[in-house]
């Protein structure tokens, strides 16, 4: 491959490395080891190398000030190990040395990118770019030429799966001769011969791609959504990370069976049951107001696919006829973003009685609308009857006791979308109740417990079991109106018959006429059959607002995901390096990790993590760690000075030398682990 030419496969491989086990290192070609190694003997009181603020850091002949990539590396200088979004504090002791302002360094490459300690970086010009051998990957072992277990990357099928354009396809000549230059290629991988047309266009000369991975800045459409102090960052936002951690925690939670003997260890094909609601006492006789049966809810793992599900148990219900499974099959076909999907229904005696169990998709961290918005008894004070002589309290206002109208419309759009999907399938929701509507995140709604009433109230004497669905659909619209009115009043007391007039007055004072008309339309009896589509004109352009908010949220999450893509690659590098360094014994050789190539990797580990300043204090710089690991992954020809721990020896090697040592040593460990050594 020529200096600046990067094929489609190699460009893809540079961003997506393969798994930890089963890949032969980096796949670099064999070259002479230690092309530049110098051993120097120094006194025990050796001075600091290169006379700057840190010992044994990288050495290069390039000028860091005039380098065309000095501004690119200034991004690392402003990144903090801490994820707290806080205003910059010039007096605080930060983990990362503070560099020049990011916008200034991007606009003017002559500004010094890093304060002392500083280490130069090679430019990204074609003269300094390390030319990759054909099939050689920038990441560990992701090239098909070095892994016979995968289809070649240049075959048509894998390339069609990706919808992201290859930057190498831009600036391509479009002459007729070039368009007819496609040839049938033949390649044998793992005993299988592939024939394919290689129609990958060759980029024009002058295109230069980075030879090692650099964290790009935040996309401008995301950066300008909300100004954040101390940005950019290596990691995702604290709020999103904490939410994901909480979901993982709930998903992996288990119960102590010694303290909960009433919970069975296995129910049908489900195991590891974990109660999601407080278990009812054994002597409880009252029934729920929704289903007229005692119910309980569990998280369980299906042994067939090892996925978590939510089990809704109906206690003391004996299923006498299986014709209702026709309706269950109809519910299984409904896949909607605002409805919890029903997977299966079965009966069991694992709880010691005849129970009916509904299995739904499990959404970790979800809470009901009732617990989020209607769990405050003080919110009902406006609708509470006053004794004689007591003064009427002032009505609540938006942002002062009432929900913002934008949030209510966001809920209306999602609930109406779920009803529209259910009614179009010929079914009825019948559980449009705040206690059966789940909220995940901030505003994401899902209608839960669908299909339960269809099984509990199934009438075997009817010939047409869908005859009553239109009536149930009309009841769904009334229930939707009650939910919206309760949200507008921020109280369930507002939907009681004696408080309807007072509740509508509260809506008229605080909200728009569109919201008031929508509630009146849903709660008022009509002479004709209504449809959920009738409220679409009342929602109007607010659909575009919700669509815009959803897409902006998607942009933010994709930007956070992009930060973690490279972090996973660097983690695999550190994991491989950790299997080599300080290994007590290998092949009955206790000094294996202290000799040969392993000694260089040990010094490189010290270069990464154990540097100190001239005063002897630890030198902590996350950008230095990330930059060095990226250079190791790419195998740059840049030189690096490695100092022994007694400071009597200095080894000058290149990153390409370290990469060859790294991959050969790891392949040796893999061969011993697989028994082929």
Image: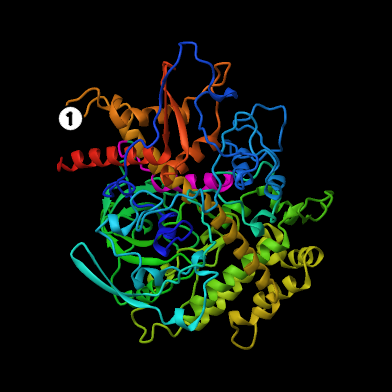
- x then y, percent, for residue 373: 63, 54
SS of the residue under disc 1? loop
Q: Is residue 275 above or below residue 558?
A: above
Q: How many numbered circles does the render carry? A: 1
Q: Residue at x 31, y 30 (%)?
A: 598
Q: Residue at x 45, y 60 (%)?
A: 6
What residue range appears in magenta?
235-258
**Magenta stretch contains residue 664:** no
Q: Is residue 590 visible?
A: yes
Q: Residue at x 50, y 76 (%)?
A: 421
Q: Quadrant of residue 151?
A: bottom left
Q: Quadrant of residue 254?
A: top left
Q: Is residue 482 visible?
A: no
> Which residue is labeled 1 in the image?
587
Q: The N terminus is located in which quarter?
A: bottom left
Crowding at mark 1 (Cα within 10 Å: few <14, some 14-19, many 20+): few
**Magenta stretch contains residue 247:** yes
């Amino acid at each position: 491959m020529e200096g600046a030419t990067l094929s489609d496969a190699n460009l893809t491989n540079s961003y997506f490395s393969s798994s930890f086990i089963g890949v032969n290192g980096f796949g670099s070609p064999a070259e002479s080891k230690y092309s530049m190694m110098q051993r120097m003997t120094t006194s025990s009181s050796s001075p600091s190398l290169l006379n700057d603020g840190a010992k044994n850091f990288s050495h290069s002949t390039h000028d860091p000030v005039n380098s065309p990539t000095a501004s690119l590396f200034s991004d690392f200088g402003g990144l903090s190990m801490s994820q707290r979004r806080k205003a910059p504090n010039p007096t605080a002791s930060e983990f990362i040395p503070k560099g020049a302002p990011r916008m200034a360094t991007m606009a003017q490459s002559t500004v010094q990118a890093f304060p002392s300690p500083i280490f130069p970086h090679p430019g990204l010009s074609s003269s300094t770019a390390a030319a990759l051998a054909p099939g050689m990957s920038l990441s560990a072992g992701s090239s098909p030429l070095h892994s016979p277990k995968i289809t070649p990357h240049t075959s048509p099928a894998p390339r069609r799966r990706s919808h992201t354009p290859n930057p190498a396809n831009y600036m391509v000549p479009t002459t007729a001769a070039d368009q007819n230059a496609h040839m049938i290629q033949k390649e044998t991988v793992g005993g299988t011969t592939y024939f394919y047309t290689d129609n990958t266009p060759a980029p024009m000369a002058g295109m230069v791609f980075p030879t090692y991975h650099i964290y790009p800045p935040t996309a401008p459409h995301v950066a300008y959504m909300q100004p954040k102090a101390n940005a950019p960052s290596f990691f995702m936002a604290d709020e999103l990370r904490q939410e994901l951690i909480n979901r993982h925690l709930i998903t992996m939670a288990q119960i102590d069976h010694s303290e909960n003997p009433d919970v069975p260890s296995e129910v049908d094909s489900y195991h590891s049951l974990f109660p999601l609601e407080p278990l009812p006492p054994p002597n409880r006789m009252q029934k729920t107001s929704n289903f007229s049966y005692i119910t309980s809810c569990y998280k369980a793992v299906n042994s067939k696919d090892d996925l978590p599900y939510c089990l809704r148990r109906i206690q003391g219900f004996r299923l006498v006829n299986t014709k209702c499974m026709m309706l269950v099959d109809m519910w299984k076909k409904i896949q909607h973003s605002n409805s919890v999907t029903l997977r299966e229904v079965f009966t069991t005696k694992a709880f010691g009685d005849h129970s009916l169990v509904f299995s739904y998709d499990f959404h970790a961290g979800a809470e009901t609308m009732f617990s989020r918005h209607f769990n405050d008894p003080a919110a009902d004070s406006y609708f509470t009857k006053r004794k004689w002589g007591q003064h009427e309290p002032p009505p609540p206002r938006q942002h002062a006791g009432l929900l913002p109208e934008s949030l209510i419309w966001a809920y209306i759009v999602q609930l109406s979308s779920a009803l529209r999907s259910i009614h179009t399938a010929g079914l009825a929701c019948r559980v449009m109740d705040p206690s059966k509507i789940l909220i995940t995140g901030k505003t994401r709604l899902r209608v839960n417990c669908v299909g339960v009433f269809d099984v509990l109230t199934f009438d075997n004497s009817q010939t047409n079991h869908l005859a009553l669905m239109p009536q149930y659909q009309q009841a769904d619209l009334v229930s939707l109106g009650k939910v919206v009115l309760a949200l507008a009043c921020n109280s369930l007391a507002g939907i009681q018959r004696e408080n309807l007039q007072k509740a509508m007055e509260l809506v008229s004072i605080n909200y728009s006429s569109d919201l008031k008309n929508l509630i009146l339309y849903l709660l008022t009896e009509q002479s004709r059959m209504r449809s959920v589509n009738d409220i679409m004109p009342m929602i109007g352009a607010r659909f575009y607002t919700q669509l815009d908010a959803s897409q902006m949220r998607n942009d933010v999450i994709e930007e956070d995901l992009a930060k973690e893509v490279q972090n996973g690659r660097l983690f695999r590098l550190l994991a491989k390096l950790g299997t080599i360094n300080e290994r007590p014994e290998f092949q009955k050789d206790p000094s294996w990790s202290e000799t040969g190539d392993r000694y260089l990797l040990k010094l490189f580990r010290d270069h990464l993590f154990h540097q100190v300043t001239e005063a002897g204090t630890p030198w902590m710089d996350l950008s230095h760690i990330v930059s060095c690991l990226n250079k190791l992954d790419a195998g740059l020809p840049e030189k690096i000075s490695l100092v022994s721990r007694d400071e009597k020896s200095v080894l000058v090697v290149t990153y390409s030398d370290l990469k060859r040592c790294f991959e050969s040593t790891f392949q040796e460990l893999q061969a011993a682990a697989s028994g082929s050594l």
